Amino acid sequence: MKYSKFEEKVWLSSPTMHGEEQEFVQEAFDTNWVSTVGANLTELERILTEYIGCNYAVALASGTSALHLAVKLADVKPGDLVFCSDMTFAATVNPVSYEGGKQVFIDCERDTWNMDPNALRKAFELYPETKAVIVANLYGTPAKLDEIQAVCQEYGACLIEDAAESLGATFRGKQTGTFGTENIISFNGNKIVTTSGGGALLTDCKEDADKVRFWSTQAKENFPWYQHEEIGYNYRMSNVLAGIGRGQMLHLNEHIELKKKIFMRYQEGLKGLPISMNPYLPYTEPNFWLSCLLIDRESPVTPDQIRETLAEYNVESRPIWKPMHMQPVFQERHFVQVEEQAVDEDIFARGLCLPSDIKMSAETQDVVIDMIKDLF
Ligand SMILES: *Cc1c(COP(=O)(O)O)cnc(C)c1O
């Protein structure tokens, strides 16, 4: 082997803690607010509304639970169709099934690797009654959110923005997680900031925020006894974990800067190879959560070759999200595309997520870049 194996694994994206997180957690212990009420929760929600620029944030147990409640707010009923990003993590689309809805998967475009507004329009022409759309901002890159918003408005559909991967990214200067009627973020361990596990629903609508608080804490009506008129959920975030989030939010901008440096270093280092990086629109600022490469069609090198080589040296990389319409569990769902060959199948075949951990040193990254270069 030309290089020596890294003693410590080089991760795709792992949690980065700073110290303040533990102080806020300690505060929860000291005051004995260790359950689902307390100052960390209130503060985290306030910080989120301020940072993102929305009226309400409700901290929940996960991004997935936030999406589930967003789907409920959109009034998705058994048999209802929901248009969903196709190339994304399964968590974007699973909540539709929790409510008995049926996903219709929408192909992506090449400019951002996100939902293609033209394919979305075609889907509405096929199924104009569709009530909801879920769009994800892949790897921290904003989708063509203005166009998607416009198509949704035209057809009177509710837009749910899955900003789980894009916290801190902006579209024409506006934060992602504000373009939908309902929006969600995730604090899962591999995301740009984490609470170990957690998420939040973001909205400008007070009734919706109140409803989500109500559903997420077992739908207890305002009676002395436990009175239930609706089905509830145990989806609230713990005040202990909210403390981690409070500490992490102090470092979100710093994490974004480091992620961007990693992206730029790949872009520079891989220049001259038959490779391009995951693209973004000039009027958007991604959070650069994951750096990905796309190998030119003519090149004989495959993403698997790169992935397997890096793995030999203890470096983690990962295939692009396998499109949902290719997943066995969704094989009966419709898929809408506008190009002859599905764009996302093509990106899946030629793309790879590169190690983007902000604790990776520049020296380590340079070795990773050299390893990739050697394959070409
Ligand atoms: C991580 C992620 C989610 C789910 O978030 P959890 O907090 O892990 O439940 C949803 N959508 C996308 C696109 C994600 O990457």
Image (cartoon, helix red, strand yellow):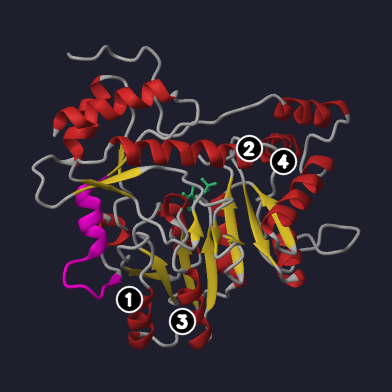
Q: Nearer the viewer, residue 256 or 33?
A: 256
Specify whether 175 is left or right of 244. Answer: left
Res. 151 mark:
3
Residue 144, given in percent of the width and then of the height, sits at 44, 68
- Residue denoted by label 1: 119
4 or 2: tag closer to the N-terminus: 2
- Residue denoted by label 4: 238
* Contact? badges 1 and 3 (CB < 8 Å): no
Q: Residue at x 40, y 40 (%)?
A: 264
In the rendered view, tell whether residue 108 sits above or below residue 152: above
Separation of residues labelled 4 and 2 (CA atoms): 10 Å
- Residue denoted by label 2: 195
Separation of residues labelled 3 and 4 (CA atoms): 37 Å
Q: Magenta segment: does it hold 350?
A: yes
Q: Is residue 188 visible?
A: no
Specify whether 8 is left or right of 54. Answer: left
The amino acid beneath tag 2 is Thr
Dot 1 lies on which element? Answer: helix
Single out the mark in the foreground, 4 or 1: 1
Q: Quadrant of the C terminus?
A: top left
The amino acid beneath tag 1 is Ala
2 or 3: tag closer to the N-terminus: 3
